[in-house]
Image (cartoon, rainbow, N blue to C red):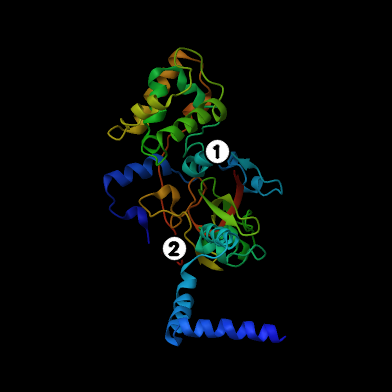
Amino acid sequence: MNRLDNWGERVTRRLAGRLSRRSALSRLGALLVAAPAFPLLPVQRARAADSAAHAQKGTDFSRAAQTHDDTACNYWRYCGIDGNLCSCCGGSTHSCPPGSQPSPTSWIGSCINPDDQRAYLIAYRDCCGANECNQCSCLNTDHAMPIYRPQANNHIIWCFGTQSFEYHCSMAVLVGLAE
Amino acid sequence: MVWPAMKTPLALKLILCGLMAAVAGAAVAAVPPAQAYSGRRVSRLSAVQVAYLTSCGGCHGVEGVSAPQAVPTLKALTGSFLCTRQGRQFIVRLPDVALSSLSNRMLTRVMNWVVFDLGAPVAGGHEAHRYTVAEVARLRREPLTQTGLTPYREQVVAHLGARCAVPAGLTVYGAAYAVGVKSSSPKS
């Protein structure tokens, strides 16, 4: 024990003789300030890169989307919808309410399903030939183009080819999985 | 808001007439029901199918058929255009094909898929071969933007009919147009 005490005293005295108190403090301070500037372990760096890639995947819409309530504007398939949800009007995401007809034409966009993070093509198909439903009006714009690119514009009444141009509501029909 | 009443530039009208040509009362019976895609089985789509669907399939239909009088049917018909050189060039020079946002390479793949898969059978003869990227790149530099598309199409189809046995479906397309936008909230 005595020997350990003597050794400890020797080391401390040698350090005290060589280093000023200010020097020790400044080195400790520099260490504290500089440490965060250096990435730590490679594992941590890999995980950070992974989560950055994960965060870039998808859109603002898809990161806040849900997959259980198709009467809410943030249902995942509605990422580019503009209009009244047929799901709130007596129809569904893929069927028209009674008394209205599905349009044979639509515009096709894609939405990311938050459950599997994969992109699915969605046909935004309007139901036509009945008074406007006026329930659950949504406006989402993923992959929608301005009106001068009408092929992918969601503001147009997509009733081309039906008997009536009277807009009722909009569906979001699942076309398939984009591989 | 009644959009078609607005004064639109000629170019925009051409685009609208070319792709969005529509007529109220077109054969609704021929419309594939949207419910057809509601099954539990989700089809897996290749890159060329995704390009077709997002660039063409909205109007022309997921399976190449929508409202035949308003939008030309592709299914089992586009192959017939390869009967003549004029027909072969026509379907690439159409404004919405030539001026699409697809790259030359992807547009070539889409055209070959639309003609040889979706639009089969392909008419026999000298022109019945696959498009190359160089050919599509050259043809799309001469889009049919200065031509009345409806009479030109009639002429192309008449020449096809004189040379090959073409399906009757080729002459169904071509009628009056009607275009509109939603009248009230939230689309107004």
The x, y position of residue A139, in whole percent, is 48, 64
Is A79 situated left or right of A146 in this image?
A: right
Q: Residues within 10 Å of mark 2 (few under 14, many from 20)?
A: some
Residue B111: image x %, image y %? 47, 30
Q: Which of the 4 quarters of the picture holds residue A88?
A: bottom right
Residue placed most toward the observer, A107 or B178: A107
- Judging by the rendered image, the residue that carries numbered circle 1 is B49
Amino acid of disc 2:
Lys
Q: CA distance from mark 1 to mark 2?
A: 30 Å
Q: What residue sits right under mark 2 in the picture?
A: B187
Mark closest to the chain's N terminus, 1 or 2: 1
Q: Residue at x 42, y 39 (%)?
A: B102
Chain label for disc 1: B
Judge by depth and name the residue closer to the eye, B62 or A133: B62
Q: Who is closer to the viewer here, A117 or B152? A: A117
- The residue positioned 46% from the left and 23% from the top of the image is B81
